[in-house]
Amino acid sequence: MKLAVLGGGGFRVPFVHQALVQGGASLHVDEVVLQDTDADRLTAMVQVLDQLSAGSARRPRLCATTVLDDALAGADFVFAAIRVGGVAARVQDERVALELGVLGQETTGPGGLAYGLRTIPVMVEMARRIAELAPKAYVLNFTNPAGMITEAMQSVLGDRVLGICDTPSDLGRRLARAVGVGATRLQLDYVGLNHLGWMRRVLHDGEDVLPALLADDARLASVEEAEVFGAPWLRTLGAVPNEYLYYYYRNREAVQNILASPSTRGEFLAGQQTELFRRMLAEPGRAAALWRGAVSERGASYMAEARGGSAGAPVGAPVEDAPLDGQDLAEQGYAGVALRVMEAITEDRRATMILNVRNGTTLPGLPEDAVVEVPATVDANGVHPLATPAPDLHQLGLMQQVKAVERATIRAALSGSREQAVLAFGMHPLVRSLDVADRLVQGYAERIPEVAAVLRP
């Protein structure tokens, strides 16, 4: 079985590779092909993967290429995790918005729309190449903004594209620890869009244990979202929001905190990744150790700048050989979800997980072909969203507004329409100004060449 990884020089690729090496014995991936436009990053990443999997009898044959068609030809699964414009464009996603007093974040708000504008045409073209060269492949999309990209790709490949985000599954694991029950014994009632969702019920033996957790100060204190939002707000909602809703519920504070931070998240990562890849190429024998250290540093500062902390350690700080073992890597984030999806499809081992999938009739308040983030079962016949209780008015209203924004962004990206781009920015609840929307579109086109290439003059 062949797996193609698009964006194969990306920082998070080792999580996926280790999930294959350390994961279930029933999944047999014979070949992994890393594809990227940056040959140096591919070289460094191959070194990391070889060192992390050294001695394992289960590691697949590893190839690397800069040629997209070579990677796709005959693939059974395609993982897509690309960043059009690189981290340099992410820096501008954040800064252009912040300079206008609105949220600068890579997936939520105007930064996410700029990211989508330049990424959608590339991903839709990739979908066309997949349809030609690997028509039976399933595409597991990690490229952000994941819901928007997945929806655009589905216009070519249909339900063979699904989006994976680690945030809902990580939230489920945190809640399982808080209630003292194994995650596999819980049924999670989650509803939303990518980076915009709520955990509404946590069922154990048919009983919703979430109300008792919300009422228990001691146990709730162990849940990160209680720190992010405050326990009183969770009790008021009667649900646990996805952490990205911090940017909506505390938008003014988030913008102020990011502006006061020495650097944005993108600026921190740009410095860290430049130094990391330089050192990995200069010290190939330590590539995996250097990467582990960067993982530790990166994770410790996640979302910190928006909550009044620092985006990360100073650029150039010593990178430690962080003690992460292979099993930790296999279980972290979206890699574990992706492995379960592959096992469910190839082995017909039905599994349930929270995914970005075509809505169908799951949520009547949204179009049938809209991509939503809900629990779904996966088996040899594909992905099937589960029936779920209707969202409340607050949840549905926000989802509808953001979905309208996503669809306008897709139209702008595929048509080159500046008017549709301004419409998307102007409708976004975190912009709320047509004048600012117009200036955002102009600013992104001036500062990010890949955005300028999409929009008509």
Image: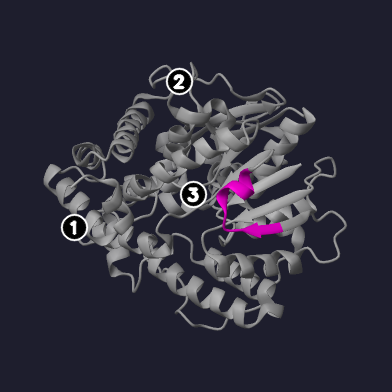
Q: Quadrant of residue 305?
A: bottom left
For residue 440, above or below residue 394: below
Give the labeled residue for mark 1.
Answer: 100
Q: Give the spatial CA distance, label 2 vs label 3.
A: 25 Å
Query: Which residue is at 37% across, 26% downward?
Result: 396
Mark yes or no: residue 174 visible: no
User: In this figure, what is the number of numbered marks?
Assistant: 3
Q: First in sequence, mark 2 or 1: give its number.
A: 1
Which is nearer the eye, 89 or 6?
Answer: 6
**Callout 3, which amino acid?**
Glu
> Which mark identifies residue 225?
3
| Residue at 73% in and 27% down | 350
Which corner quadrant holds the N terminus?
top right
Q: Position of residue 384 (x, y in %)?
A: 61, 23
* Mark 3 Cα shell of 10 Å, populated few (<14), some (14-19), many (≥20): many
Label located before the other in sequence (3 or 1):
1
Pointer 1 local density, CA inside 10 Å: few below 14, some 14–19, many at least 20: some
Query: Magenta part of the protein: which range?
Result: 63-72
Mark 3 near mark 1, Cβ–Cβ under 8 Å?
Answer: no
The label nearer to you, 2 versus 3, is 2
- The CA span between labels 3 and 1 is 29 Å
- Mark toward the start of the polypeptide (2 vs 3): 3
Q: Position of residue 443 (x, y in %)?
A: 20, 57
Determine the residue positioned at 29% across, 51% down.
453
398 or 67, which is in the foreground?
67
Q: Residue at x 28, y 38 (%)?
A: 412
Circle number at residue 208: none
Q: Amino acid at mark 2?
A: Leu
